[in-house]
Protein backbone atom coordinates (compact mmCIF):
# COMPACT_ATOMS: atom_id res chain seq x y z
CA UNK A 1 0.00 0.00 0.00
CA UNK A 2 3.08 2.25 0.17
CA UNK A 3 2.64 5.59 1.83
CA UNK A 4 -1.06 5.89 1.03
CA UNK A 5 -3.03 6.50 4.21
CA UNK A 6 -6.25 4.73 5.13
CA UNK A 7 -8.65 7.48 4.17
CA UNK A 8 -7.07 8.15 0.77
CA UNK A 9 -7.13 4.40 0.10
CA UNK A 10 -10.83 4.19 0.88
CA UNK A 11 -11.87 7.19 -1.17
CA UNK A 12 -9.57 7.03 -4.22
CA UNK A 13 -12.01 6.14 -7.01
CA UNK A 14 -9.53 4.83 -9.59
CA UNK A 15 -7.12 2.75 -7.52
CA UNK A 16 -5.69 0.57 -10.32
CA UNK A 17 -8.96 -1.29 -10.76
CA UNK A 18 -9.13 -3.49 -13.89
CA UNK A 19 -12.15 -2.71 -16.03
CA UNK A 20 -14.32 -5.19 -17.88
CA UNK A 21 -12.35 -4.92 -21.13
CA UNK A 22 -9.11 -5.97 -19.49
CA UNK A 23 -10.50 -8.44 -17.00
CA UNK A 24 -11.93 -11.04 -19.33
CA UNK A 25 -8.64 -12.01 -20.94
CA UNK A 26 -6.89 -12.37 -17.60
CA UNK A 27 -9.74 -13.81 -15.54
CA UNK A 28 -8.14 -17.25 -15.32
CA UNK A 29 -5.15 -15.64 -13.56
CA UNK A 30 -7.18 -13.96 -10.83
CA UNK A 31 -6.61 -15.29 -7.30
CA UNK A 32 -9.14 -17.96 -6.41
CA UNK A 33 -11.33 -17.72 -3.31
CA UNK A 34 -13.84 -19.77 -1.35
CA UNK A 35 -16.88 -18.45 0.52
CA UNK A 36 -18.00 -20.00 3.82
CA UNK A 37 -21.42 -18.78 4.93
CA UNK A 38 -24.31 -19.48 7.25
CA UNK A 39 -27.04 -18.71 4.74
CA UNK A 40 -27.54 -16.76 1.51
CA UNK A 41 -30.85 -14.97 1.00
CA UNK A 42 -31.87 -11.52 -0.33
CA UNK A 43 -30.27 -8.63 1.62
CA UNK A 44 -28.37 -10.97 3.92
CA UNK A 45 -24.69 -10.28 4.58
CA UNK A 46 -23.89 -13.06 2.12
CA UNK A 47 -26.00 -11.35 -0.54
CA UNK A 48 -24.54 -7.85 -0.15
CA UNK A 49 -20.97 -9.18 0.04
CA UNK A 50 -20.90 -12.20 -2.25
CA UNK A 51 -23.06 -10.59 -4.90
CA UNK A 52 -20.50 -7.78 -5.23
CA UNK A 53 -17.61 -10.22 -5.15
CA UNK A 54 -19.14 -12.14 -8.07
CA UNK A 55 -20.46 -9.30 -10.20
CA UNK A 56 -18.56 -6.17 -9.15
CA UNK A 57 -19.66 -3.03 -7.36
CA UNK A 58 -19.83 0.75 -7.47
CA UNK A 59 -18.09 3.18 -5.12
CA UNK A 60 -18.20 6.95 -5.41
CA UNK A 61 -19.81 6.74 -8.84
CA UNK A 62 -17.20 4.38 -10.30
CA UNK A 63 -17.88 0.76 -11.29
CA UNK A 64 -15.32 -1.91 -10.43
CA UNK A 65 -15.08 -5.41 -11.84
CA UNK A 66 -14.09 -8.36 -9.63
CA UNK A 67 -10.38 -8.92 -9.12
CA UNK A 68 -10.87 -12.31 -7.47
CA UNK A 69 -12.41 -15.47 -8.91
CA UNK A 70 -14.91 -17.17 -6.61
CA UNK A 71 -14.78 -20.93 -7.17
CA UNK A 72 -16.52 -22.54 -4.21
CA UNK A 73 -19.31 -22.11 -1.66
CA UNK A 74 -20.04 -23.82 1.60
CA UNK A 75 -23.49 -22.87 2.93
CA UNK A 76 -24.90 -24.17 6.21
CA UNK A 77 -28.62 -23.47 5.77
CA UNK A 78 -31.01 -23.35 2.80
CA UNK A 79 -34.27 -21.54 3.58
CA UNK A 80 -37.12 -21.14 1.10
CA UNK A 81 -35.60 -17.90 -0.22
CA UNK A 82 -32.12 -19.42 -0.64
CA UNK A 83 -29.87 -17.79 -3.22
CA UNK A 84 -26.77 -19.97 -2.81
CA UNK A 85 -27.82 -22.69 -5.23
CA UNK A 86 -28.94 -20.39 -8.03
CA UNK A 87 -25.98 -18.03 -7.65
CA UNK A 88 -23.60 -20.97 -7.74
CA UNK A 89 -25.21 -22.20 -10.95
CA UNK A 90 -25.28 -18.71 -12.50
CA UNK A 91 -21.61 -17.97 -11.85
CA UNK A 92 -20.09 -21.41 -12.26
CA UNK A 93 -19.31 -21.77 -8.55
CA UNK A 94 -19.29 -25.24 -7.03
CA UNK A 95 -21.34 -25.76 -3.87
CA UNK A 96 -19.54 -28.16 -1.49
CA UNK A 97 -21.02 -30.08 1.46
CA UNK A 98 -18.25 -29.21 3.92
CA UNK A 99 -15.54 -26.62 4.49
CA UNK A 100 -12.45 -28.78 3.80
CA UNK A 101 -13.72 -29.79 0.37
CA UNK A 102 -14.71 -26.17 -0.41
CA UNK A 103 -11.16 -25.04 0.39
CA UNK A 104 -9.57 -27.93 -1.49
CA UNK A 105 -12.03 -27.71 -4.41
CA UNK A 106 -12.72 -31.39 -3.94
CA UNK A 107 -9.05 -32.35 -4.21
CA UNK A 108 -6.40 -33.42 -1.71
CA UNK A 109 -4.81 -30.02 -0.94
CA UNK A 110 -5.78 -26.43 -0.22
CA UNK A 111 -6.52 -25.02 -3.69
CA UNK A 112 -7.73 -21.44 -3.13
CA UNK A 113 -5.82 -18.23 -2.38
CA UNK A 114 -8.24 -16.69 0.11
CA UNK A 115 -11.43 -17.32 2.03
CA UNK A 116 -14.32 -15.17 3.26
CA UNK A 117 -16.33 -16.33 6.28
CA UNK A 118 -19.79 -14.73 6.35
CA UNK A 119 -21.11 -15.96 9.67
CA UNK A 120 -24.18 -13.73 9.95
CA UNK A 121 -27.93 -14.47 9.66
CA UNK A 122 -29.61 -17.85 9.72
CA UNK A 123 -31.70 -19.82 12.17
CA UNK A 124 -29.53 -20.16 15.30
CA UNK A 125 -30.40 -19.89 19.02
CA UNK A 126 -29.25 -17.15 21.38
CA UNK A 127 -27.13 -17.49 24.49
CA UNK A 128 -28.64 -16.46 27.86
CA UNK A 129 -26.87 -13.09 27.51
CA UNK A 130 -28.48 -12.53 24.10
CA UNK A 131 -25.75 -13.34 21.57
CA UNK A 132 -26.92 -15.19 18.49
CA UNK A 133 -24.92 -18.41 18.41
CA UNK A 134 -23.56 -17.92 14.92
CA UNK A 135 -20.92 -20.59 14.18
CA UNK A 136 -18.20 -18.09 13.26
CA UNK A 137 -15.66 -19.74 15.56
CA UNK A 138 -16.55 -23.18 14.19
CA UNK A 139 -16.05 -21.99 10.61
CA UNK A 140 -12.75 -20.27 11.46
CA UNK A 141 -11.44 -23.38 13.22
CA UNK A 142 -12.34 -25.54 10.22
CA UNK A 143 -10.48 -23.18 7.85
CA UNK A 144 -7.43 -22.95 10.12
CA UNK A 145 -7.37 -26.75 10.45
CA UNK A 146 -7.13 -27.17 6.68
CA UNK A 147 -4.33 -24.62 6.46
CA UNK A 148 -2.36 -26.37 9.20
CA UNK A 149 -2.90 -29.82 7.71
CA UNK A 150 -1.92 -28.69 4.22
CA UNK A 151 0.99 -26.48 5.26
CA UNK A 152 -0.23 -23.33 3.53
CA UNK A 153 -1.57 -20.09 5.02
CA UNK A 154 -4.08 -18.00 3.06
CA UNK A 155 -5.81 -14.69 3.89
CA UNK A 156 -9.11 -14.75 5.79
CA UNK A 157 -11.94 -12.22 5.91
CA UNK A 158 -14.18 -12.83 8.95
CA UNK A 159 -17.45 -10.88 8.97
CA UNK A 160 -18.35 -9.07 12.22
CA UNK A 161 -17.11 -10.11 15.66
CA UNK A 162 -15.09 -13.22 16.42
CA UNK A 163 -17.40 -15.43 18.48
CA UNK A 164 -20.26 -15.49 20.98
CA UNK A 165 -17.97 -16.75 23.79
CA UNK A 166 -14.88 -14.90 24.98
CA UNK A 167 -12.72 -18.04 25.21
CA UNK A 168 -13.45 -18.79 21.55
CA UNK A 169 -12.71 -15.20 20.52
CA UNK A 170 -9.38 -15.22 22.33
CA UNK A 171 -8.47 -18.58 20.80
CA UNK A 172 -9.19 -17.25 17.31
CA UNK A 173 -7.03 -14.18 17.88
CA UNK A 174 -4.17 -16.28 19.27
CA UNK A 175 -4.37 -18.64 16.29
CA UNK A 176 -4.23 -15.72 13.86
CA UNK A 177 -1.05 -14.57 15.58
CA UNK A 178 0.51 -18.03 15.84
CA UNK A 179 -0.12 -18.92 12.20
CA UNK A 180 0.58 -15.38 10.95
CA UNK A 181 -2.68 -15.39 9.01
CA UNK A 182 -3.26 -12.31 6.83
CA UNK A 183 -6.57 -11.34 8.35
CA UNK A 184 -9.23 -8.71 8.46
CA UNK A 185 -12.63 -8.84 10.07
CA UNK A 186 -15.25 -6.90 11.92
CA UNK A 187 -17.75 -4.30 10.86
CA UNK A 188 -18.19 -2.37 7.63
CA UNK A 189 -18.69 0.86 9.60
CA UNK A 190 -15.02 1.88 10.08
CA UNK A 191 -14.59 1.57 6.30
CA UNK A 192 -17.64 3.47 5.14
CA UNK A 193 -18.13 7.15 4.26
CA UNK A 194 -17.87 9.70 7.05
CA UNK A 195 -20.14 12.67 6.51
CA UNK A 196 -18.67 15.13 7.15
CA UNK A 197 -15.16 13.63 6.77
CA UNK A 198 -13.54 12.96 10.12
CA UNK A 199 -10.17 11.35 10.82
CA UNK A 200 -8.17 11.87 13.99
CA UNK A 201 -4.44 12.35 13.74
CA UNK A 202 -2.40 9.84 15.71
CA UNK A 203 -1.82 11.15 19.20
CA UNK A 204 -5.12 12.99 19.55
CA UNK A 205 -5.91 13.61 23.23
CA UNK A 206 -9.47 12.42 23.73
CA UNK A 207 -11.58 12.85 26.84
CA UNK A 208 -14.86 11.22 25.80
CA UNK A 209 -16.25 9.34 22.79
CA UNK A 210 -19.86 8.43 22.00
CA UNK A 211 -21.55 6.43 19.24
CA UNK A 212 -25.20 5.92 18.32
CA UNK A 213 -26.79 2.80 16.85
CA UNK A 214 -30.33 1.53 16.35
CA UNK A 215 -32.29 -1.73 16.10
CA UNK A 216 -30.84 -4.73 18.02
CA UNK A 217 -28.11 -3.96 20.59
CA UNK A 218 -26.19 -7.18 19.87
CA UNK A 219 -26.34 -7.33 16.08
CA UNK A 220 -26.30 -3.58 15.40
CA UNK A 221 -24.80 -2.10 18.55
CA UNK A 222 -21.64 -3.99 17.64
CA UNK A 223 -21.22 -1.75 14.61
CA UNK A 224 -21.30 1.34 16.83
CA UNK A 225 -18.80 -0.22 19.24
CA UNK A 226 -16.35 -0.92 16.45
CA UNK A 227 -16.68 2.45 14.72
CA UNK A 228 -16.12 4.10 18.11
CA UNK A 229 -13.08 1.91 18.73
CA UNK A 230 -11.68 2.75 15.30
CA UNK A 231 -11.68 6.40 16.38
CA UNK A 232 -10.60 5.91 20.01
CA UNK A 233 -7.57 3.76 19.14
CA UNK A 234 -5.83 6.73 17.50
CA UNK A 235 -5.50 8.61 20.80
CA UNK A 236 -2.23 9.54 22.46
CA UNK A 237 -0.42 6.44 23.72
CA UNK A 238 -2.41 4.11 21.49
CA UNK A 239 -4.97 1.64 22.77
CA UNK A 240 -4.46 0.54 26.38
CA UNK A 241 -7.58 -1.53 26.88
CA UNK A 242 -10.77 -1.34 28.91
CA UNK A 243 -11.10 -1.38 32.69
CA UNK A 244 -14.86 -1.85 33.11
CA UNK A 245 -18.11 -2.17 31.15
CA UNK A 246 -21.74 -1.60 32.13
CA UNK A 247 -25.07 -2.16 30.39
CA UNK A 248 -28.01 0.17 31.14
CA UNK A 249 -31.51 0.38 29.68
CA UNK A 250 -34.74 2.31 30.01
CA UNK A 251 -35.20 5.64 31.84
CA UNK A 252 -31.96 5.09 33.76
CA UNK A 253 -30.05 5.80 30.55
CA UNK A 254 -31.50 9.31 30.42
CA UNK A 255 -30.97 9.82 34.15
CA UNK A 256 -27.29 8.93 33.84
CA UNK A 257 -26.97 11.40 30.98
CA UNK A 258 -28.40 14.17 33.15
CA UNK A 259 -25.89 13.24 35.86
CA UNK A 260 -22.98 13.43 33.43
CA UNK A 261 -22.20 9.70 33.24
CA UNK A 262 -22.31 10.23 29.50
CA UNK A 263 -22.40 13.52 27.63
CA UNK A 264 -25.73 14.90 26.49
CA UNK A 265 -23.77 17.52 24.56
CA UNK A 266 -22.05 14.80 22.52
CA UNK A 267 -25.36 13.06 21.85
CA UNK A 268 -26.94 16.29 20.67
CA UNK A 269 -23.96 16.90 18.39
CA UNK A 270 -24.10 13.32 17.04
CA UNK A 271 -27.83 13.54 16.32
CA UNK A 272 -27.25 16.74 14.38
CA UNK A 273 -25.40 14.61 11.79
CA UNK A 274 -28.36 12.38 10.90
CA UNK A 275 -28.78 11.75 7.18
CA UNK A 276 -31.55 9.17 6.74
CA UNK A 277 -35.16 10.21 6.86
CA UNK A 278 -36.94 8.68 9.78
CA UNK A 279 -37.34 9.79 13.36
CA UNK A 280 -37.52 13.60 13.53
CA UNK A 281 -34.87 15.50 15.45
CA UNK A 282 -36.23 16.59 18.84
CA UNK A 283 -34.70 18.67 21.64
CA UNK A 284 -32.97 16.91 24.52
CA UNK A 285 -35.97 17.46 26.77
CA UNK A 286 -38.03 15.19 24.47
CA UNK A 287 -35.53 12.34 24.10
CA UNK A 288 -37.24 10.18 26.76
CA UNK A 289 -40.60 10.50 24.97
CA UNK A 290 -39.16 9.85 21.50
CA UNK A 291 -37.08 6.91 22.75
CA UNK A 292 -38.65 5.39 25.89
CA UNK A 293 -36.55 2.22 25.74
CA UNK A 294 -32.95 3.33 25.19
CA UNK A 295 -30.04 0.96 25.71
CA UNK A 296 -26.47 1.88 26.57
CA UNK A 297 -23.09 0.23 26.96
CA UNK A 298 -20.84 2.38 29.15
CA UNK A 299 -17.09 1.89 28.82
CA UNK A 300 -14.25 3.03 31.04
CA UNK A 301 -10.87 2.72 29.36
CA UNK A 302 -7.75 2.03 31.38
CA UNK A 303 -6.24 5.43 30.54
CA UNK A 304 -9.33 7.35 31.70
CA UNK A 305 -11.15 7.77 28.39
CA UNK A 306 -14.96 7.54 28.70
CA UNK A 307 -16.90 5.72 25.98
CA UNK A 308 -20.63 5.25 25.44
CA UNK A 309 -22.68 3.43 22.84
CA UNK A 310 -26.35 4.43 22.81
CA UNK A 311 -28.86 2.23 20.98
CA UNK A 312 -31.70 4.67 20.31
CA UNK A 313 -34.68 3.27 18.44
CA UNK A 314 -36.99 6.18 17.76
CA UNK A 315 -34.24 8.79 17.53
CA UNK A 316 -32.02 7.67 14.64
CA UNK A 317 -31.61 5.41 11.62
CA UNK A 318 -27.93 6.25 11.27
CA UNK A 319 -24.65 5.29 12.90
CA UNK A 320 -23.35 8.46 14.50
CA UNK A 321 -20.21 9.51 16.36
CA UNK A 322 -19.11 12.42 18.52
CA UNK A 323 -16.04 13.10 20.63
CA UNK A 324 -14.51 15.68 22.92
CA UNK A 325 -10.80 16.35 23.04
CA UNK A 326 -9.13 17.26 26.32
CA UNK A 327 -8.77 20.77 24.91
CA UNK A 328 -12.56 20.97 24.71
CA UNK A 329 -12.70 20.71 20.91
CA UNK A 330 -15.77 18.81 19.69
CA UNK A 331 -16.06 16.54 16.64
CA UNK A 332 -18.91 14.58 15.06
CA UNK A 333 -19.84 12.67 11.94
CA UNK A 334 -22.32 10.23 10.45
CA UNK A 335 -20.74 6.91 9.46
CA UNK A 336 -23.03 6.67 6.50
CA UNK A 337 -24.50 3.43 5.21
CA UNK A 338 -26.90 3.00 2.33
CA UNK A 339 -29.68 1.18 4.12
CA UNK A 340 -31.30 -0.16 0.94
CA UNK A 341 -28.64 -0.08 -1.78
CA UNK A 342 -25.92 -1.44 0.53
CA UNK A 343 -23.19 0.12 -1.61
CA UNK A 344 -21.05 0.65 1.49
CA UNK A 345 -20.43 -3.11 1.29
CA UNK A 346 -18.24 -2.33 -1.69
CA UNK A 347 -15.64 -1.16 0.82
CA UNK A 348 -15.65 -4.63 2.43
CA UNK A 349 -15.26 -6.38 -0.92
CA UNK A 350 -12.54 -3.94 -1.93
CA UNK A 351 -10.66 -4.55 1.30
CA UNK A 352 -10.98 -8.33 0.88
CA UNK A 353 -9.58 -8.06 -2.63
CA UNK A 354 -6.64 -6.04 -1.34
CA UNK A 355 -6.09 -8.57 1.46
CA UNK A 356 -5.88 -11.49 -0.96
CA UNK A 357 -3.81 -9.59 -3.53
CA UNK A 358 -1.29 -8.05 -1.11
CA UNK A 359 -1.65 -10.21 2.07
CA UNK A 360 -1.82 -6.90 3.97
CA UNK A 361 -4.57 -5.11 5.89
CA UNK A 362 -4.92 -1.81 7.67
CA UNK A 363 -7.45 -3.20 10.17
CA UNK A 364 -5.77 -4.56 13.30
CA UNK A 365 -7.24 -7.84 14.59
CA UNK A 366 -6.80 -6.38 18.08
CA UNK A 367 -9.59 -3.94 17.28
CA UNK A 368 -11.90 -6.82 16.41
CA UNK A 369 -10.87 -8.66 19.59
CA UNK A 370 -11.50 -5.63 21.80
CA UNK A 371 -14.82 -4.81 20.10
CA UNK A 372 -15.84 -8.45 20.51
CA UNK A 373 -15.04 -8.24 24.21
CA UNK A 374 -16.99 -5.01 24.63
CA UNK A 375 -20.02 -6.68 23.05
CA UNK A 376 -19.78 -9.86 25.12
CA UNK A 377 -19.07 -8.19 28.46
CA UNK A 378 -21.69 -5.53 27.83
CA UNK A 379 -24.31 -8.22 27.32
CA UNK A 380 -22.95 -10.13 30.33
CA UNK A 381 -23.56 -7.00 32.41
CA UNK A 382 -27.16 -7.00 31.15
CA UNK A 383 -27.55 -10.64 32.16
CA UNK A 384 -26.28 -9.82 35.65
CA UNK A 385 -28.66 -6.93 36.15
CA UNK A 386 -26.76 -4.00 34.69
CA UNK A 387 -23.90 -3.41 37.12
CA UNK A 388 -20.32 -2.50 36.29
CA UNK A 389 -18.16 -5.47 35.28
CA UNK A 390 -14.43 -5.35 35.81
CA UNK A 391 -12.74 -6.50 32.60
CA UNK A 392 -9.08 -7.43 33.16
CA UNK A 393 -9.48 -9.65 30.07
CA UNK A 394 -9.73 -6.48 27.97
CA UNK A 395 -6.32 -5.07 28.89
CA UNK A 396 -5.55 -5.17 25.17
CA UNK A 397 -2.78 -2.86 23.97
CA UNK A 398 -2.03 -1.94 20.39
CA UNK A 399 -1.01 1.03 18.27
CA UNK A 400 -2.28 1.85 14.78
Image (spheres, rainbow, N blue to C red):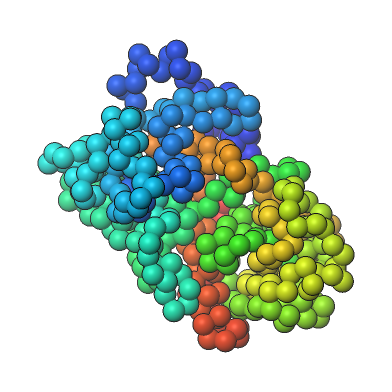
Q: Which residue shows up at 47% across the image and 77% down it?
A: 129
Return the x and y of residue 333 as percentages of the image width and height: 74, 50
Q: Is residue 128 left or right of residue 197?
A: left
Task: Classify 16 as above or below 145.
Answer: above
Q: How many marks?
A: 0
Task: Classify 247 as above or below 20.
Answer: below
Return the x and y of residue 340 as percentages of the image width and height: 59, 43
> In terms of image quadrants, where is residue 257?
bottom right
Return the x and y of residue 92 as percentages of the image width and height: 28, 29
Return the x and y of residue 4 as percentages of the image width and height: 59, 33
Q: Answer whether residue 126 is visible to the viewer in this image.
A: yes
Q: Which residue shows up at 51% across the image and 48% down it?
A: 363
Q: Which residue shows up at 53% across the image and 41% down it?
A: 345
Q: Is residue 60 left or right of residue 31?
A: right
Q: Which of these two is toward me, 326 or 272?
A: 272
> In terms of image quadrants, where is residue 68?
top left
Task: Classify 238 as above or below 197.
Answer: below
> In terms of image quadrants, where is residue 258?
bottom right
Task: Classify 273 as above or below 341.
Answer: below
Q: Answer whether residue 236 is visible to the viewer in this image.
A: no
Q: Is residue 315 left or right of residue 241?
A: right
Q: Residue furthest left?
A: 108
Q: Which residue shows up at 79% across the image and 63% down it?
A: 266
Amino acid sequence: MGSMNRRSFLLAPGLAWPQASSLGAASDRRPRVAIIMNVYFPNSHADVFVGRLLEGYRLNGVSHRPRLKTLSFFCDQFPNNDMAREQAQEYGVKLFPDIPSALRLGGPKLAVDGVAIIGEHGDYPRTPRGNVMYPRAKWFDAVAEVMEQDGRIIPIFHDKYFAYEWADALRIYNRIQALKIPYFGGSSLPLTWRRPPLEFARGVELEEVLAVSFCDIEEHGYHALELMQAMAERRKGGETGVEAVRYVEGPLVWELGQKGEWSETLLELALSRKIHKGPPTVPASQWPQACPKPQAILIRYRDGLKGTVLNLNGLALDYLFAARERSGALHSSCFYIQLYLHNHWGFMVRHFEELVLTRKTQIPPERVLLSTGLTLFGLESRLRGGGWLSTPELAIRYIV
